[in-house]
Amino acid sequence: MSKIRILSAADVEKLFTVDMALAAVEDAYVQKSDGSGSVWPMVFHDFETGVADLDIKSGDLGAKQIFGLKLVSWFGTNEAMGLPELFGTVLLCDRATGAPVALMNAGPITGLRTGAAAAVGAKYLARPDSRSLLMVGCGAQSPYMVAAALYVLPGIERVTLVNPHNPARAATRLPGMADKVAALLAGCGVKREYTFVSSEDTESAVRGSDVILTATPAREPMIRSAWVQPGTHFSCIGADMSGKQELDTDILRTARVFGDDAGQCFAVGECEIPHREGALDALAAEIGDVILGKAAGRVSPSDVTVFDSTGIALQDLASGAVILDRACELGEGIVVEL
């Protein structure tokens, strides 16, 4: 009989760190680029529009000899019953036999791997002399993005937090976010010196930033092309379904634009609306091709670069694989026979 290891949210939080997430996400992009990993068609089901839905992202990683999926369900009525609105689960299977080998809570994985994705984009596309980082959005994802970016961009000296839809919220959220970022970095043995401030003026913050991370539910652009300085890099996370857009279309019209998966970027990502409007015909490259040197990233200090991170299953599978290895090494989780 086969055995499966089950890991709770607490188990995953204990085992998974920023540096592990960065390595896993970069490996996922590389395997997608070199063909050893593949992304399978996404499944979305709307139980009741605006009330309950689910999506399934799946694929395989040949170098890790696994395949699997992440299932995320949203039930908006759960709060009234004292339950989380979101449930996420990652399932890993042995590619040689098909046997399930691990089932784990996807919540902590999603935060770290999404933050790592934004940072990997900045690592390969931002100017090496970047000193200022802007986080646009104050949600639960933001501290993971800031921590991962600080890990890969050692030159960052100032971090600014803005929240365009509710400007005053940035100051309220700043202390808790600063503590969370410090804790995430400490979890992988890193202590950074930098200034962390909030602002209610999105335009001036954009004008003064070298690297800009976005994670909002915006359906109308929050950042205008006139504000963007030459050499700026954007890593965009918020556009994860059709109709969402965080950047002015004119930014993508003239920028060097990269993504994690071209098909998803044009279907549901930051690229969707600019593509539909005729402002963007194709990506400069997928990020995995840049990592492997198969395509050029930034070619000039004055380039404006955009990384459209829509989220692919391989990020979750690669993260799950390193978590599973660590769990087996330390004896964490519960092992049951199927």
Image (cartoon, rainbow, N blue to C red):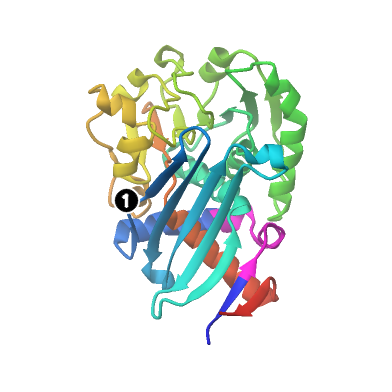
What residue do we see at 52% from left, 19% from top?
206
Magenta segment includes 16: yes
Residue 318 x/y as whole percent: 48, 61
Q: Main secondary structure of the magenta part?
A: helix
Q: Examine the rendering and report whether any part of residue 297 can be seen.
A: no
User: Residue 129 or 292: which is nearer the viewer?
Assistant: 292
| Residue hosting label 1 | 289
Does 335 appear above or below 23? below
What residue do we see at 63% from left, 17% from top?
166
Does 325 appear above or below 290? below
What residue do we see at 46% from left, 71% from top?
93
Q: Picture quarter containing residue 232?
A: top left
The boundaries of the magenta stretch are 6-21
In which quadrant is the C terminus drawn? bottom right
- The amino acid type, in three-letter code, at marker 1 is Asp
Residue 320 x/y as whole percent: 54, 63
Q: Examine the rendering and report whether any part of residue 215 can be seen.
A: yes
Magenta segment includes 275: no
**Secondary structure category for the residue under label 1:** helix
Along the horizontal axis of the image, is 305 left or right of 25?
left
